[in-house]
Amino acid sequence: MKKITSILSLLPLAFFMNCNNASTEKQSKTVQLVTLDPGHFHAALVQKTMYADVDSVVHVYAPAGNDLQLHLDRINGFNTRSDQPTHWKEEVYTGSDFFEKMISEKKGNVVVLAGNNQKKTEYILKSLEAGFNVLADKPMAINPVGFEALIKAFETAKEKNLLLYDIMTERFEITTILQRELSMMPEVFGTLDTGTVEEPAVVMESSHNFYKNVSGSVVVRPAWFMDGSQQGEGIVDVTTHLVDLVQWECFPGQKLDYTNDISMSAAKRWPTNMTATQFKTITKNDIPSYLDKNKLNDSTLQVWSNGEINYKIKGVHAKVSVVWEYQTVSGNDAHYSLMRGTRANLAIRQQAEQQYKPTLYIEPLVNDSSYEKVLKEKITALQTKYPGIDLKKSTKGWEVTIPDKYKEVHEAHFARVTQNFLEYLKKGNMPEWEVPNMLAKYFTTTKALKMATSKK
């Protein structure tokens, strides 16, 4: 039996008097969002801002429970904030047949997917078959079976002239953007080295904390987040961003063919041990029975959150790795990125020395006296695109100093990805390299999982 709820009653009456009639708005807006089973806060971040062509009424289909309530609370927070409040209207269906109901009612044309990943690829494929465009959080596939379904999903999207796109927020981090820009300057970077397995030309690493205290409150994670069969193991989850950056930075605008351009060298995964007390602290629940398979004993759970992939992409050796700890000494997440060039290395570091803020360095390999002159000329030219950036001498070369106006918080990147998607939707297509490179990305992660789990 269906159950319809709404957060409209939570908003001030005066606010509604200033809003357009929903039915009138539907006639003028070209995009109607449908949110499916929003188990991850990324689903809400898509709606942190309003968009010119998007209807303010969003239909949500999900099982009743804490995940859904947290999603609605976040949307309500955006609607009631004092600074640039949004005016979303959530219409919610919580019947057990929520997915079938979404398909049959088709009250929108774009499905937003961010949550439990166990059925995500199935949801993607069936949504496309039903005529929806899909904007999905990563990962879109968490195992080789899912990858095969994803291939079919992209074929379906092409046949039906629909868009399937994943949310790659890290492309909008300013140090990453500038690392990419500098790598395309032969006078500064040279050409990308090919590297070796032992010394890859490209290295992407990220480290994370399960336990986070934000504004005095412990971030609550769903219990299934610790289950690789639902969230996806670390080697196919966060590494999605890292593999994407390798492709996006090293081969800008180039189409990749995963059947020829990518080969695995090595892959491994390992667990983070978490006590029952720690698990309850971050989930507010005891360890559920579906995680019994990952228990070392009654008081310790193995969370398969860590992974490393060594591979070749178009002849270039790359390594990506992700590590999760329950809580690091600093409590800060961190990112490391290295691109080795024939004239300089480009490195992003985010440790104590950088106050745990991503910082970009240019570290020349040449002793050419003219290098500094050329570098400064190139930075001056780049200032026309990014006014205010500059250079500061560092131990191994130069630090790129970046004005705070470019340093957006991670949450702001979701609006940028969504705006890109909406622009592609308006045009009816996206850059020709995006689809083959999404396939290459998920081939890499799922192939690595298969290699890592097949080891004796």
Image (tube, rainbow, N blue to C red):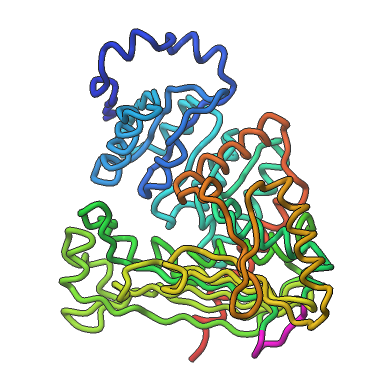
Q: Quadrant of residue 304?
A: bottom left
The stretch in magenta equals 193-199
Give the image location of residue 192, x and y in percent. 78, 74
Give the image location of residue 411, x and y in percent. 44, 47
* Residue 189 drawn in magenta: no
Q: Residue at x 48, y 91 (%)?
A: 456
Q: Quadrant of residue 421?
A: top right
Q: Nearer the viewer, residue 115 or 18?
A: 18
Residue 222 in view here: yes
Q: Nearer the viewer, residue 53 or 95?
A: 53
* Residue 194 drawn in magenta: yes
Q: Main secondary structure of the magenta part?
A: loop
Q: Is residue 186 left or right of residue 298?
A: right
Residue 263 in view here: no
Q: Residue at x 53, y 67 (%)?
A: 239
Decide: is 44 above or below 93: below
Give the image location of residue 38, x and y in percent. 38, 43
